[in-house]
Amino acid sequence: MITVGVTGGIGSGKTTVCNIFGVLGVPVYNADTEARHLTNTHPEIVKKVSLLFGKDIYNNGQLNRNKVGALVFSNKELLQQLNAVIHPLVAAHFKVWLSKHRYCSYVIKEAAILFESGAYRQVDKVVTVTAPQGVRIKRVMRRDGISEKMVLDRMKNQMEEKEKVNKSDYIIACNDVDLVIPQVLRIHEELMV
Ligand code: ATP
């Protein structure tokens, strides 16, 4: 079985592309969604995150992500400690998930920061979803109802698209011009062999 990482900048269309793979019957693991879910529900993570940030960091069982973001923004050590709590347990969760899909030709791991986090080393192939920056900004402003500045702030921590493209096995252009489904189908046919 092959593990394929799908990545791309904010608003590039990763989830849209992964939904198409999903319709084709390919199992998709969304690393960001699973990490968020585990951060709220996994007893060991909840305990350790509460120790790092104080119990008030959870409101009705939900981690106050804005507060965490603000606290780790200027404190790299705290960010490393947080990652050291979350990453091993998410990795273990992914491993269990993988074992359930052993019978598949390939599976997808969707991760926004696949390269930045180093997780690309644990996948066999990488697909990068691309779209021009202006298009991505407009999409996220519309989808999340936020300002251009807020989108640009979120983009700051991400690797340049060019760099991701250079490190990838496949590229899917998810812009306003190219058709996305045929691009996904071409990759699917190659990976199903
Ligand atoms: P994020 O990193 O912020 O989670 P993402 O890369 O997963 O974003 P999507 O959520 O798939 O991106 O897409 C962002 C927005 O753009 C969504 O509202 C989606 O419906 C829209 N979108 C995605 N692809 C296209 C496309 N080819 N044409 C028009 N709109 C698109």
Image: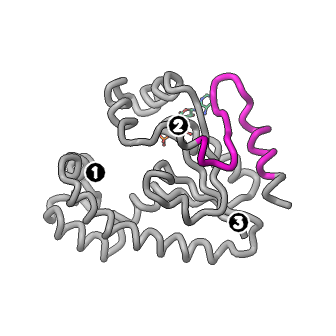
Question: Who comes first in sequence, dot 3 or dot 2?
Answer: 3
Callout 2, which amino acid? Glu
Tag 1 residue: 65
The quarter of the rendered structure image containing the N terminus is bottom right
Q: In this image, 131 relative to 77: left or right? A: right
Q: Nearer the viewer, residue 160 or 150?
A: 160
Sooner in the amino-acid sequence: mark 1 or mark 3:
3
Give whichever of 121, 9 is nearer the camera: 121
Residue 186 counted in the magenta span: yes
Write down which quadrant ligand 1 falls in: top right
Question: Magenta span covers which residues?
Answer: 165-188
Q: Spatial distance from mark 3 to mark 2, Cα to Cα?
A: 24 Å
Residue depicted at 53% across the width and 24% down the height: 135
* Residue 193, percent from left and from top: 86, 61
Residue 172 quadrant: top right
Label 3, on which residue? 2
